[in-house]
Each structure stands twice: as C-alpha cells, then as structure tokens.
Amino acid sequence: MIRVNLLPHREEKRRARRQQFYALAGLVLVLGAVIAIAVHTIISGYISTQEAKNAFLKTEIAKLDKEIDEIKRLKEQTDALLARKRVIESLQSNRAETVLFFNELAKQVPEGVYVRAVKQSGLKINIAGFAQSNARVSTLMRNLDASPLLEKPNLVEIKSAMQGTRRLSDFNLNVTITRAAPDDGKALPKGNSAPAGGKKS
C-alpha cells in the first residue's frame, strides 16, 4: 500500500490563502484610503466654493448697506427740502394775510368799539378792547362772523370797566381767520362783508 503525505500540500494551500487574504486586505485598505482622500478633496472643494460665495455675498451686502445709507441720507435731504418748500409756499400764500386782516378788522369794527390789543396764534386771533355797550360787542361779533376772511367769533370775557369818568365794556374775544387754500391763494368766501362801521346801537 502506497502512502502519500498531504501535509505539505495543505500547508501550501493555507499559505496561498493567507497571501490572498493579505493582498485583498491591503487592496481594500488602499482603495479605502483613495476613496477617503477623494471624498475629503471633494468636500474641501465644496467648502472652498461656499466660502467664496459667502465672501462675495458679504461684500455685496456691505455695498447694499452703503447704498441704503446713501438713499436714507438723500431721503432725509429731500424731506428737509420739501419741508422748507412747504414753509416758503405757506409764507408766500399768506404774506398778505396780516394786511388783509387789519383792513377787514377796520371794516368790521362798529362805531363805539375801540380795539386795544390783537394777538394771533396760528389761525386763532385774540382781540381785546373797549366798547360803549355790550350791544356794540354783539354787533362786532356779528360783523366778524359775516366777514369772508374771519369766522367763529367766540366771546371769552366781557366786564364793566371805568375809563376816566366813562363806564365802558372791557371785552376779550377770539376769532378764526379763514386761511387761503394752498392751490388757489384766495380766502374761502363765506358771505358778504358787513357794511363798514356797522349800525349804531
């Protein structure tokens, strides 16, 4: 009977399998390293691109902020100029208002009424003076209410006062001036003016 020793053959096969395993493991490690490097390179490229985009956006945002500040400054200057323009237009449209008021007041003050003080605050005008009687004050208020330039006379106070040897009515009243409309430059008429001097009471 012939005996064959198979141990060396099996040992060779085991050694060959081990070599294949090591070679395969080494190949997998190398492939994994290549893949990791490639992924890292791609991600780094994405990060660099995104950082470049972010830097560009920051630069553009800074430019826009400067432009917005410039627009705000121009808007403030425009608003200031418009405000000055409105003031100038108001002064131009109402520059003759004082003259017109005193002319109208001279027309509407009846006989026996003496104006001693006139004070204007906005559209409201305060008139103080003396009258020979309360009826003369009523006549003055009716005349002012009928005036095309004045309206809403309101008696604040009336009291008796001595001027020398004469007893007079010391009165204080408010009246509103009818300011000209911005587009026509004329006072809004509300009726015919009363005759100059009024009627004696």
Image (cartoon, helix red, strand yellow):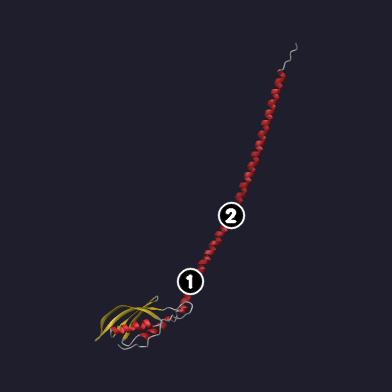
Residue furthest to the left: 165
Give 101 or 137, whichever is nearer the viewer: 137
Residue tagged by mark 2? 57
Mark 1, residues whose alpha carbon is within 10 Å: few (<14), some, or many (≥20)?
few
Mark 2, residues whose alpha carbon is within 10 Å: few (<14), some, or many (≥20)?
few
Image x and y of residue 186, in percent: 46, 81
Residue furthest to the right: 2
Q: Amino acid at mark 2?
A: Leu
Q: Amino acid at mark 1?
A: Ala
Q: Is residue 112 left or right of residue 180?
A: left
Residue 160 picture quarter:
bottom left
Q: Secondary structure at mark 2?
A: helix
Residue displayed at 52% across by 65% down: 73
Circles 2, 1 touching at the beta carbon (< 8 Å)? no
Image x and y of residue 41, in percent: 64, 43
Numbered tag placed on residue 156 in the rendering: none
Residue displayed at 52% across by 69% down: 78
If you read the primary sequence from the N terminus, does the residue marked by circle 2 or circle 1 appear first? 2
Number of numbered discs visible in the structure rendering: 2
Residue displayed at 42% across by 83% down: 100
Residue furthest to the top: 1
Residue displayed at 61% across by 52% down: 53
As drawn, 9 above or below 38:
above
As drawn, 142 above or below 48:
below
Residue 57 picture quarter:
bottom right
Quadrant of the rendering where the N terminus is positioned: top right
Q: Secondary structure at mark 1?
A: helix
Cα separation between marks 2 and 1: 38 Å
Quadrant of the rendering where the C terminus is positioned: bottom left
Image x and y of residue 141, in percent: 34, 82
Residue tagged by mark 1? 83
Image x and y of residue 158, in percent: 28, 79
